[in-house]
């Protein structure tokens, strides 16, 4: 949480499970420089809840009482206001805010177990466990994937852990009841159609039905109809999932921002251009900025500046109308999965001591149009092109080891859904059908990849030879022979001329695929920070990302440490994958169809 200026403000929404009440907020306080003292006020509906003095030193803890707050619809909304007094003779730096880190809420009471299907999912979910048969049908695997993605989409930044476990023969309930703020869902094909609570304490949820009904019952959890399921058993009628097809013209309101505004001496706002909200990979993005700013008095000059990552893409002088009505083109080279378009008013002149000049208000309207064109193939290759290049519906191909491949597929789909602002749809099918399909796909072939129609960025065989495509941005294929042979799992992205696909495979080491997915799931931010076209996990070493000409250790990307040098293939995959011995290079032209 960040509080800018001498008087900062933040609104906090706290989810509250039934039976609990928030007791206090705890955090670590990072004070701006040159602050003499400060106070934090917490209010709810113009009623003061607490007033706390900020600690005198930097990075010290603070405890803010929340006694007496009103809980409405399983949530509490409070407003936090900070008041800072600078050291005499000093001004507060406007870009150096008061920060609260490691923010946490302590609750009192005991969570009440759900009594109806409508109340099964709590306001706070730490872990979801999905139980399916040890030899699942594809329809059971698809139901598990749909439920996992629906729950992840519902909870957003809470990032609940998702686990998939096997059921024993004829088992219909978990062995142990759920812990508070955790839930278990059993999915099993059968003649009885129902979504029902089962078991004592914190009950599990059974989703059952014949093959032609099971998916329909699984859809109930993500449907608005679930709020009406105020009993312990419900049977859903026909529920259809209609893919959200993207339009060429939208607005920033439809992209999740009802409008943005800021009041400051040099106000600036950020417009989020999220390709997952567009529902496709985009190019030729244009934003028609509509808004207003406070007209400047005589003697003060200024300009409107638009920028991405600090790089100015357009600017024009302010005028006495205070109206913004201008098209801004976003260069394709600056487009990423998430692109923030900054709009600022920069002024010059006598603004008084500490910027005591009357502040300027900058507003960009929510109805500002955004034009896009589908990018086919995606402008950004590799992991930065997903999940938007896979939307709106993903074909999932699983092999003969149905349970293990389902668990791997759910891990990948959950990682993709965490990055997406929109819910995604999926269909599970045999691996061969998914390879033949023209639709975007997630392909699970954990033992190895041998289909010649899809050439992976990094291929390997059990003899230890690696085949790497696209080194230094070319199309040739380079080979690397390892002696002794090394085993690794990988997650790779590929555009085969028709669609984007993600392939989970190995060179005979499926356990390394599982290790790689476990590493990614351990910190959800690792998914969004993946770069390149492939990430490889050698046994006993950290995963490494590889992209044409610019591989780098995945751990560096996760930590955000971009000042370390990128590795060329010889110093990257070689150093990570092998433990010594002989290496032979040879280069050959890319064979058609491989």
Image (cartoon, helix red, strand yellow):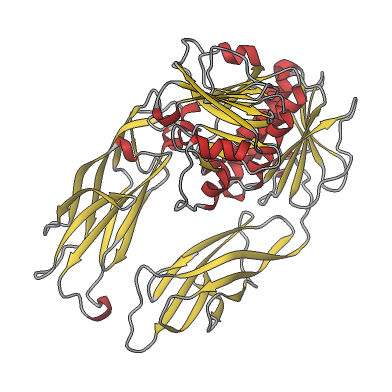
| Residue drawn at 74 percent across, 23 percent down | 140
Residue 453, image x and y in percent?
A: 53, 12
Residue 276, image x and y in percent?
A: 46, 36
Q: Which corner quadrant of the image does residue 467 belong to?
A: top right
Judge left or right: residue 243 versus residue 403: left
| Residue drawn at 41 percent across, 31 percent down | 472
| Residue at the extreme front | 582
Residue 44, image x and y in percent?
A: 53, 68
| Residue drawn at 75 percent across, 27 percent down | 404
Considering depth in this image, is 172 or 355 the residue closer to the camera? 355
Considering depth in this image, is 476 or 439 the residue closer to the camera? 476
Considering depth in this image, is 231 or 221 the residue closer to the camera? 221
Residue 570 higher or lower than 269, as above or below: above
| Residue at the extreme left | 298
Judge left or right: residue 569 versus residue 339: right
Judge left or right: residue 316 versus residue 153: left
Q: Is residue 510 visible?
A: yes
Q: Which corner quadrant of the image does residue 579 belong to?
A: top right
Residue 133, image x and y in percent?
A: 82, 26
């Amino acid at each position: 949480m960040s509080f800018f200026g001498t008087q900062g403000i933040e609104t906090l929404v706290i989810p509250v499970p039934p039976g609990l009440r928030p007791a206090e907020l705890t955090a670590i306080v990072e004070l701006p420089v040159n602050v003499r003292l400060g106070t934090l006020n917490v209010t709810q509906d113009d009623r003061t809840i607490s007033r706390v003095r900020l600690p005198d030193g930097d990075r010290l803890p603070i405890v803010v009482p929340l006694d007496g707050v009103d809980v409405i619809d399983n949530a509490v909304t409070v407003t936090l206001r900070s008041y800072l007094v600078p050291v005499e003779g000093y001004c507060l730096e406007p870009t150096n805010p008061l920060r609260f880190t490691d923010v946490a809420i302590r609750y009192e009471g005991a969570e009440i177990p759900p009594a109806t299907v409508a109340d099964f999912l709590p306001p706070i979910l730490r872990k979801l466990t999905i139980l399916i048969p040890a030899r699942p049908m594809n329809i059971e695997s698809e139901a598990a994937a749909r439920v996992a993605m629906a729950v992840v989409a519902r909870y957003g930044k809470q990032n609940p852990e998702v686990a998939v476990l096997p059921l024993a023969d004829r088992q219909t309930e978990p062995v142990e009841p759920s812990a508070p703020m955790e839930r278990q869902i059993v999915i099993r094909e059968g003649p009885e159609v129902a979504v029902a609570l089962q078991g004592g304490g914190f009950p599990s949820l059974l989703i059952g039905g014949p093959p032609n009904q099971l998916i329909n019952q699984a859809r109930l959890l993500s449907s608005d109809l679930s709020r009406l399921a105020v009993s312990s058993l419900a049977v859903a009628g026909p529920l259809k999932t209609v893919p959200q097809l993207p339009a060429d013209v939208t607005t920033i309101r439809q992209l999740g921002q009802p409008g943005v505004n800021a009041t400051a001496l040099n106000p600036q706002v950020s417009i989020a251009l999220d390709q997952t909200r567009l529902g496709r990979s985009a190019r030729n993005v244009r934003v028609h900025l509509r808004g207003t700013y406070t007209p400047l008095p005589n003697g003060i000059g200024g300009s409107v500046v638009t920028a991405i990552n600090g790089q100015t893409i357009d600017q024009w002088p302010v005028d006495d109308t205070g109206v913004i009505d201008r098209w801004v083109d976003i260069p394709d080279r600056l487009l990423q999965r998430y692109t923030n378009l900054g709009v600022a008013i920069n002024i010059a002149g006598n603004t008084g001591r500490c910027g005591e000049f009357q502040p300027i208000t900058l507003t960009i309207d929510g109805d500002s149009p955004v034009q896009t064109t589908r990018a086919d193939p995606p402008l950004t290759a590799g992991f930065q092109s997903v999940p938007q290049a896979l939307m709106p519906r993903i074909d999932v191909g699983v092999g003969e080891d149905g349970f293990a491949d389902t668990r791997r597929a759910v891990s990948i789909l959950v990682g993709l859904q965490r990055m997406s602002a929109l819910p995604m749809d999926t269909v599970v099918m045999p691996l061969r059908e998914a390879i033949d399909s023209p639709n975007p796909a997630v392909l699970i072939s954990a033992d190895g990849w041998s289909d010649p129609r899809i050439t992976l960025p990094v291929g390997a065989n059990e003899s230890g030879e690696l085949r790497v495509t696209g080194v230094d941005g070319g199309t040739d294929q380079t080979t690397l022979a390892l002696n002794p042979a090394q085993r690794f799992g990988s997650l790779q992205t590929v555009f085969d001329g028709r669609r984007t696909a993600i392939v989970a495979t190995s060179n005979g080491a499926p356990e390394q695929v599982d290790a790689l997915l476990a590493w990614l799931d351990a910190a959800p931010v690792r998914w969004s920070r993946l770069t390149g076209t492939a990430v490889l996990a050698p046994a006993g070493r950290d995963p490494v990302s590889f992209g044409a000409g610019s591989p780098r250790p995945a751990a560096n990307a996760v930590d955000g440490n971009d000042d370390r040098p990128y590795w060329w293939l010889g110093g990257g995959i070689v150093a990570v994958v092998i433990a010594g011995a002989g290496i032979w290079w040879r280069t050959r032209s890319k064979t058609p169809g491989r």
